[in-house]
Amino acid sequence: RISAAGYPSRWTYEEFFSRYRLLLRGPQHQDQAQALCRQALPELIPDPDQYCFGKTKVFFRAGQVAVLERLRSERLRVAAVMIQSRLKGWLQRVRFRRICWAAGTLQRYSRGTLARRLALTLRYTRAAVVIQKTFRMAVVRQLFLMIRRATVTIQAFTRGSLARRRHRQLVEVRAAVLLQAWVRGWLARCAYRRVRRAVVFMQCCVRRKASRRELLKLKAEARSVESYRELNKGMEVKLMQLQLRVDQEVRESCALRETLNAEREAFSSELEALRAIIQKLESQKRGKPPPGPVVSEKEVEERRRAEEKAALEILHLRQELQALKKEKESVEMEKKDLAARLLEQEKTQRECVHQAVLQASLALRTELDEERLKYQGLLRDFTRLEQRYDNLREMSLLSERGKGHRRTDSTQSLSFEPLSPSPTPLSPQSPTSLFTSPFPSSPEEERRHSVTSPSQERRLSVWSLDTPLDQLMENTDVPKDPAVKVKREDLEHAYDAVRVANKFLERQLRQQDARQEEELEALRSQLSQAIVCSSSAAQTQDLQELLEARERECVRLRREVKELRNTVLLRRLLTHVFPTASTTEAFCPSQLKPAAATGLMECRKRDENKLIKNLITDIRVDSALSLSPGLPASVLFLCVRQADCSGDQSRARALCGAAISAMKAALKKHVADLDMTALWLKNICLLHDLLVQHSSNQNRDSDELVPLTFDLSDLIRTLSDLCIQAYQQLLSITETRLQKLIVPALLESETITGLSGSVVKLAASRKRAGSEPRPVGADSPTMASLLRELGAFHTALTRQAVPQSLTEQVFRQLTYLITASALNNLLLRKDMCCWSRGIQIRYNVSLLEEWLRSRGLQTGGAVSTLEPLIQAVQLLQVGKKTDADAQAIVQTCTALSSKQIAKILALYTPHSDLDEKVSLNFMRKVQELLRGRSDSQPPQLLLDVRRVFPVTFPSSPPPIISVEELVIPDSLKISFLRRT
């Protein structure tokens, strides 16, 4: 009835009490559930029409249960907040107590540390004061000792100088006397040699004439018929002797044949007789009976005995035969065994010798590489120190220039002493020009040579007029000019030789001048005819340009004629001054040789500095790269060879030395230019090979190679060192370019998309690994950029025609740098040691291998140096679970050390949930197997990035160079060179 009145919800008093007891107040008992409900409901629901009490249940209208639930949830929330606040307050109080305790502990330890640091600072301060006191005392004492030693040294040098000056005066007096004796003896010997040479020459002419007459007579006799008859007679006698010898041998062979036939007939007749006797005995045995019993018994007994004896002999012979057969078989077996043993021993011995030779050669090659590496390392250090010295010298010069007044150096005053000769009336120019270097030197070098080269001062002092030797010769009435004592005919011979040579030169120049004038007149006539007959402006302009070029050529030839006339005049004057030298040069065969030397280039002495400047020092990069490979070295060598063939060995050596110094300066100038460094490497190597090929110590298979007459050992050694320096500079430039590309391109570039993680992770790991930061927005280097750099380097070497073996050595060094840098970075970065990154790296390495093979660089060891990186990547890709996997890892990774394998396994990171991390048991198994492996690799974790392989330059003789084969562009501005 109550439910029908509109109370859809109903609860028993027990259910209501158990559900909403949280909302009730006061003491709560289960027995008083109805009373408590009646007491609490008016407070919870103010409207009494919304509920009704029954006998056992409470009835509610629609929505009232929801109100009760809301009140219950609010009461529960308030209780939960209260509990949380109490719990959080307790936790914060515990944390506060712990922080207070920790702060107190830190303050206690920090105050103790500060106190100990203060005590240590006081001790160090006291020790520093003691050290400073001792050091200052030592510095002052060393300064005092140095000043004392300097004083004693100055006194010793002063006293020694005075003593040497007195000794020099005495030596000069004695030398004057000896000089007179030697000069007179030398003049007498010269006269005697001249007479003896004339006598020998006359004897040679007479004997040569007699020999020619005898030769003509013999030739006439040989052509006559009698000589042929005599030759025929001799041949007939020889034929008769040979025929007699053949007849005698035929007679001997016939006699031997007859003797052999007679013996055969005697043996055959004897054999027939024996056969007849045997047949007769057999027929008698068969036909005739025995004559009596006694005879038969005896015959039977004898026959029986003979048969037994024969049987015993046969048995014995058979036994011996069997024994001999067995012995023969045993001997044959022993022979075969011995032969097999000998073969095995020979094979073993041959293998042992081969192994020993291989080991010895390998040891020698290793030792040679080590020595070469040490020498090249010392050369690299020397180059670095030399560069530092040059930098310091430039800085000191700049600092000295910046100052206002500078005190003159004491050593510089020596260069201003009156040693320079005054011009003599015989020579049109100062004689010092004959002894000065063909290239100008800096003031520093002149000052240094003025102090360190007393020999040069002595050479210059020869020309001075007031030397002690000249005064001594004047006082002793000894003529200074040895031409006074020379006979008139010697002077005439020398003068005639010089005059003939000058006339020959003048005749050649006149002929050439005449030819040029004729060509010029012909061109002028052609020009006038072209102007009259044709109105073509272009042809007229071409002819005018050709005419101007010919006129310039004529002017140049006239200038050369004038210079040669001055040279002729100078030679005549020098002939009067030094007649003996002219005579010696006239008879010297080496100066008559240049007439046969063709295909060279002549550089005048005054143009040598310009040649070095235009060809090496100041050459532009675009002009240098457009030259044919080795053109500067070829031009320089032709000039040096022409100077040597002309008899001026000192000028040839000076030109070669100046070229080497200029090449060294060019290398320093282009220290960061790859193309120019490759160009000078090629030219230095070519010049080195040419000097080695034309040195006097070289064996020559061809007569076309004419050796250079001056000593080339120092120049070849300097060029060899310069080759190594250029090679090291080339590697330094390339390594600098590649260093920033190796890790991003080879390890981090995602060539195969979709395998590795995000780029942000790699960038963060690179920042943690300490690599160089890349600017924001810049493109990350890829394998294409790395291969592009290598391609540019290979193109620079190929453009200069660098030898293939040297190119292979360079790329072997570069691939080692790539391997070492990539492997070291891989061993230090955990994010790289995963399966997907291993596939990326292996693909990048395969691109590098394919690039090397496409250029034909795989034979020089460039691919083999990539083996450690390849095996490290394979280690990331193989399985790492079973014992077979461990055994495969140890057998495969032979180029990696034990530490590197263990490090990679420890850093390996699973790529996904399907992959697992390397277990400790597997790592222990691998380490046990690695202990049993004979590891050829050094026990190191990281590879030495700065390791440099020793370089070996190939010794290939270059082809013979001729000036007709060279193509010299006009941009070099070396048209002043003349072709011979």
Image (cartoon, rainbow, N blue to C red):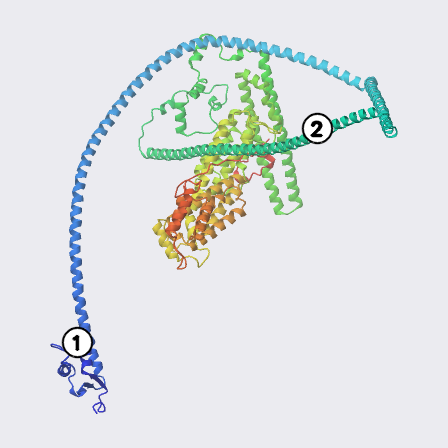
Q: Position of residue 514 (x, y in %)?
A: 63, 31
Res. 141 visible in picture: yes
Q: Position of residue 286 (x, y in %)?
A: 86, 30
Q: Position of residue 605 (x, y in %)?
A: 51, 28
* Residue located 23% across and 87% down the image: 8
Front tag of 2 and 1:
2
Q: Which residue is tagged 2?
A: 316
Q: Which residue is tagged 1?
A: 22
Left or right: residue 590 compared with residue 1: right
Q: Relative to 25, is 791 above or below? A: above
Left or right: residue 232 compared with residue 398: right
Helix, strand or loop under label 1: helix
Three-letter amino acid code of the residue under disc 2: His
Helix, strand or loop under label 2: helix
Three-letter amino acid code of the residue under disc 1: Leu
* Closer to the camera in the image, 718 or 463: 718
Q: Residues within 10 Å of mark 1 (few under 14, many from 20)?
A: few
Q: CA distance from mark 2 to mark 1?
A: 138 Å
* Closer to the camera in the image, 59 or 749: 59
Quadrant of the image containing the N terminus: bottom left
Left or right: residue 116 compared with residue 700: left
Q: Position of residue 509 (x, y in %)?
A: 61, 28
Left or right: residue 82 compared with residue 826: left
